[in-house]
Image (cartoon, rainbow, N blue to C red):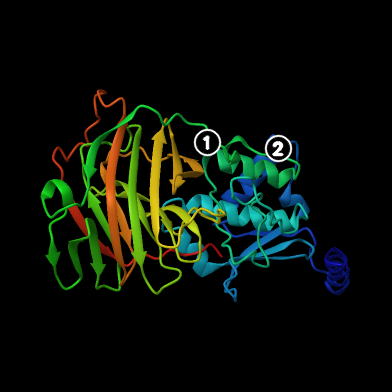
Amino acid sequence: MKQLFKHISLILLVALSGCKDQSEYRVDPEFEPYVTQFSAEAALLGHSFNFEQTGLIIEFADLKDNKAGLCHFEKPIRIEIDKTYWKAIGEYSGGDLQREHLIFHEMGHGILDRDHENGFLPNGDWKSLMCGGDRVDGKSWNINYAGERRTYYIRELFDENTAVPDFADPVFRADSSDFKNVYFLSFDSESKNDAGWSMTDVASHKISIENKRLRFESKSEAAFFVLVRPSVDVLTDFIFELDMECQTNDLNAQSGIVFGNNEAGYESLEYFSVNKRNSVFTGNRNMYSFRVELRPENVLKPNRQKFKVLKQGGRFYLYLNDRYIYNFQYENTFLGNSYGFLVPPGATVWLDNLRVALKNSNQNMRISKSFENDTFEIIEEKILFREIY
């Protein structure tokens, strides 16, 4: 029925257009590189388009209801892009790929005549960059659109029968043996060797030891990144693991682990987090939004969660409560050695057994360029975990 309505609407619009140029080409210069890229990707997959001859209109608009883009099935196809959203995503790391994703999605509707596709890959990723429309169990539309995943999503855009990619294999394929601790905080006492962070009670937060766990109480409306810097470079193959319990009244608040670099001018902190709605997230502090929201079944516990990240080769493998759930390529090349945890605004968290391990602990550890001794840092920041429109 939807397709029939679409074609009837197109006939009526053509009939009412009178002398309108049905092959008009009018694309705002900001969108032109993405249209060119669409044609180039299409050509690699055996498709040929010449929009300057057949017509295409892509223009800015002030869209309502959190719409990022809107495709009008006119002659020629006309696409509107929300100006505020376009500007916002361009100010963050990975914004160029998010802009490409948006243009490709709308051209998928208008040029390839594709409807929304809301299926999943075996690992929980959306099957297609054409996902959208009515929400599926409230899950966000965020897509991890980079590297090998971008390659897959573009192929699937032009061919719905594209094979399931290797990265979507739900079975763990990395070797996690022979990793030995090089850094460990037990939180059994207030001793620096046990607790790491100094016990303090200030206006924004309080740190203490409670029942042999580190207790961090936030008194702030901002989130906290609480970091330690052991001499283990994030470019080295490593395991970072931490038990964490979070008490918060906000069902959407995210708590979890962070790792990467917080050196001035080179900040790039990854996060792996959960909320009270049984959602799991991965993202980067520099990005407009999280990469992806996952909904693994029977993984999250009511209270205490065990987070673990294994980095091997150029890839991160994520575990929750000793169960492998996701992997993605590591794209940052900055040196850095920050490891820690994320505390939501106004929340209290309890930590246990923070460890960093290296494969074959006799290897020469790569030491971050500025930090040769362990240092501890607490960052208070109003971070927003936005959803993609």
When the figure is inspected, residue 185 is found, relative to residue 117, above or below; the finding is above
Which quarter of the picture shows residue 310?
top left
Q: Where is the N terminus found, in terms of image quarters?
A: bottom right
Residue 189 at what x, y percent from top left? 15, 53
To which residue does mark 2 refer? Answer: 163
In the image, what residue type sits under mark 1?
A: Phe
How many residues crowd mark 2 within 10 Å: few (<14), some (14–19), many (20+)?
Answer: few
Q: Residue at x 40, y 28 (%)?
A: 177
Image point 23% across, 57% down: which residue?
214
Helix or strand or loop: what does disc 2 sit on?
loop
Q: Nearer the viewer, residue 389 or 196?
A: 196
Local crowd size for mark 1, using a 10 Å CA cut-off: few (<14), some (14–19), many (≥20): some
Which quadrant holds residue 49? top right
Place of residue 35 in the rendered image (x, y in percent of width and height, measured from the top left)? 63, 50
Between discs 2 and 1, the one toward the N terminus? 2
Residue found 26% across the figure and 72% down from its top: 220
Q: Given this view, does label 2 or label 1 mark the residue nearer the observer?
A: 1
In the picture, measured across the screen, residue 46 lies left or right of residue 314, that is right
| Residue type beneath disc 2 | Ala
Q: Please, what secondary structure does the residue beneath circle 1 have?
A: loop
**CB of mark 2 within 8 Å of CB of mark 1?**
no
Q: Which image quarter is the C terminus in?
A: bottom right
Residue 23 location, x and y as percent?
A: 78, 58
Real-space Cα distance between discs 2 and 1? 19 Å
- Checking the image for residue 172, the label placed there is 1
